[in-house]
Image (spheres, coloured by chain):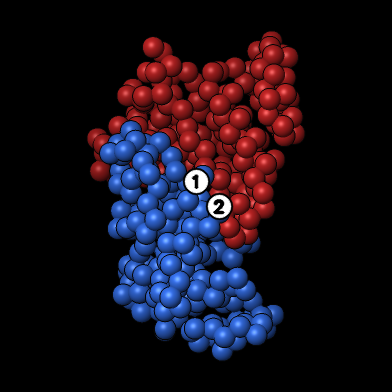
Amino acid sequence: MRLRGQTLPLSEPPRDAKGQLVPHDHQDILNDDGLIRRIPIHWVVPDEKSPTGRRLSSEAFEMSSAEMGGGMSLDIEKLIVETGKDVAAHVTPHPWVGAVRVTAGLLRGYALQVGYSPQLDNPYHAEAWGTLSKKTSKKIRLASTWVVEIEGCSLEA
Amino acid sequence: MESCAAFSSFDTTTTGAAARRMPGLERLPLKTAFVIQHDWTEEVLVRLSELMQLPVGWDGYRAKPLSRENAVFALSLLSVVMDQSKPLPSIVPTVSGSVRIEWHTLRGDVELRVNRPNSVHAWFSCVDEEEEPEVDLTFDFKIVSAWLDEIKGTNVAIERAAA
């Protein structure tokens, strides 16, 4: 499968008649696969309950608006590893300062679809779609682990 | 709307000085929105100004900078729910060009996701209560003010400011 001449590491995701990606659950993304969420500095907030005084904003695990596609951007860890690239370096170029990992199975457990959404500059890109309540978003944050830790920022609280 | 006197005072002092230090702030049509008269306002104005100046794609993908209409609405909302006794909020940009407004204290959390003017998703969590209500709000934010009263009291920022 190819994206503008680029060989894709997973099978082509479904698209509509205009070529736009359709929300889907991709069979090649397995439940145990790690998915990485990149974090810009804007999503670190103070929290008195946090052991470090700072934590990730809920915005780190939030769907975009419908006009922006309605999904949540992720990177598929195994695809980056397979190419021999440094995972941490791949997911934290400017403007990202940190990154966290969840599994596809965790997201699917909250009734989210996990699809393949290759970009021209990132063939490892995935997206999650669905409805996230605040409570669910919090559970995902608490279940996530650091890939690139932001100093002084906790995933707890 | 509060009194004209309060508005005039802010407009000729705080706004003018703040606007000179913060390029882009003058684009906020404050005069048409509401009255600003508390200490928290300058910090909020600075933050909103910063977020309005974010580049397109600030999240590394396609994120938009904070739109003026969402900034004005957020400021309007805060002018209703805030007073000197309330904890200072964190203002976080969303990829869609709006903001999430968050308060996190030892006693609990309040989060408001401004989707667009008059469309706000609000969430509340308090250490004393098992329920974590989530509601969609339009223009009545009394419940948010009440939530903030429940979680205030131990905010470090307020204590520091008072010291």
User: Which chain, by letter, is red?
Assistant: B
Task: Judge by depth and name the residue closer to the eye, B24 or A98.
Answer: A98
Q: Earlier in the sequence, mark 2 or mark 1?
A: 1
The quadrant of the picture occupied by the N terminus of chain A is: bottom right
Q: Position of residue A140 (x, y in %)?
A: 34, 58
The local secondary structure at tag 1 comes to helix
Q: Amino acid at mark 2?
A: Pro
User: Which chain, by letter, is blue?
Assistant: A
Disc number at residue A41? 1
Image-based side of A86 in relation to B107, left or right: right
Callout 2 crowding tier (Cα within 10 Å): few <14, some 14–19, many ≥20: some
Q: Position of residue A113 (x, y in %)?
A: 44, 72
Task: Judge by depth and name the residue closer to the eye, B31 or B22.
Answer: B22
The local secondary structure at tag 2 comes to loop
Q: Are marks 2 and 1 in contact (CB under 8 Å)?
A: yes
Task: Judge by depth and name the residue closer to the eye, A128 or B114.
Answer: A128
| Separation of marks 2 and 1 at Cα, in angstroms | 8 Å
Q: Chain of mark 1?
A: A
Residue plotted at (62% across, 21% down): B36
Residue plotted at (60% across, 70% down): A121
Residue A71 vertical placement versus B7 (above, below): below
Report the number of numbered marks.
Answer: 2
Q: Amino acid at mark 1?
A: Ile
Marks 2 and 1 belong to one chain: yes
The quadrant of the picture occupied by the C terminus of chain A is: top left
Image-based side of A66 in relation to A55, left or right: right
- Residue behind mark 2: A95
Callout 1 crowding tier (Cα within 10 Å): few <14, some 14–19, many ≥20: some
